Image: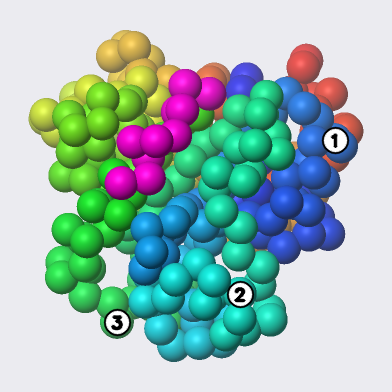
Amino acid sequence: MQLVVHRGTNVNCPENSICGIKEIRKVTEDAIIEIDIVPTKDNKLVLFHDLSLMRLCGIDKLVFEFTFDELNTIQKRYEFIELEDILKLFPTQKFLLDIRCNYHIDFFLESKIDLISIKEDLFAKYKNRLLNINTNNMIIICSDLEMAKRFINELDINVDLSENFMREYLKYIEETSALPNLDFKFKRVSIQNKFLTHKIVNIFHQNNIEVFSTPSMFRSIENSKTMLQTAKKYNCDGIWLSPINKEIIEELKE
């Protein structure tokens, strides 16, 4: 089973940080590390989970309202890092790159963002930078179907759909034993651990699509162990976990 460590951190470091990536690699160098990226005003890609600065920086504005240099001067709570610098620091590390083009409406205050009005600008900023990055050692994931298809067609890269996109189709898949006609071919699908069933996993496997289990918002070693057992029970191909320890790595090998 492939391991993805969620949001570029483990136990002691901030999410999407150099410290967090180093911390994961001390436990294992074989895991895929999931990091989130958001573009800045001057078309740089920074490691950051939210479109808004509110949750992590206490500023009620969007990341791409500021240049990269401005982001690290307007606040001191979070250190912004360019994606290119991460790839230089960890040239052999496999990353899962989560292209942020949506938000978690149930959790973060950024739900007031008018996504329709900014998506074209978002896509242009992502495209501008990704054209110059070697994505061969990456898995790219996106929560917006139309944007994902544009990445495939205009950048010729493989893109998976994120868990929050697929969630709305799970009931349909289980009831019909068929996949929705998305006009979109993908290699793997991510499903939140609590929604896994033998039937859903089997339907994806019958269509040659790998199933990765993804975690809840609650982080603990015990929770990671429980999710790993559930993923094994349903014969998943991969699992997103955070935090991890050596014991979990050993369990994955069994």
Q: Residues within 10 Å of mark 1 (few under 14, many from 20)?
A: some
Q: Amino acid at mark 2?
A: Asn
Frontmost of labels 2 and 3 is 2
Residue 229 visible in the displayed image? no
- Please tell me which of labels 2 and 1 falls first in the chain: 1
- Residue 22 at x, y = what percent? 80, 44
Left/right placement of residue 212 relative to residue 145 reads right
Left/right placement of residue 180 relative to residue 219 reads left
Q: Dividing the image into 4 quarters, which one contains the N terminus?
A: top right
Q: Residues within 10 Å of mark 3 (few under 14, many from 20)?
A: few
Q: Which residue lies under the disc numbered 2?
A: 72
Whether residue 131 appears in magenta in the rendering, the answer is yes
Please report contact status of discs 1 and 3: CB closer than 8 Å, yes or no: no
Q: CA distance from mark 1 to mark 3?
A: 39 Å
Q: Which residue lies under the disc numbered 3?
A: 112
Q: Amino acid at mark 1?
A: Val
Q: CA distance from mark 2 to mark 3?
A: 24 Å
Vertical order, 130 against 126 (above or below): above
Boundaries of the magenta span: 128-137
The quarter of the picture where residue 180 lies is top left
Helix, strand or loop at label 2? It is helix
Q: Amino acid at mark 3?
A: Lys
Q: Residue at x 17, y 29 (%)?
A: 153
- Please tell me which of labels 2 and 3 falls first in the chain: 2
Q: Dividing the image into 4 quarters, which one contains the C terminus?
A: top right
Q: Which residue lies under the disc numbered 1?
A: 27
Q: Residues within 10 Å of mark 2 (few under 14, many from 20)?
A: some
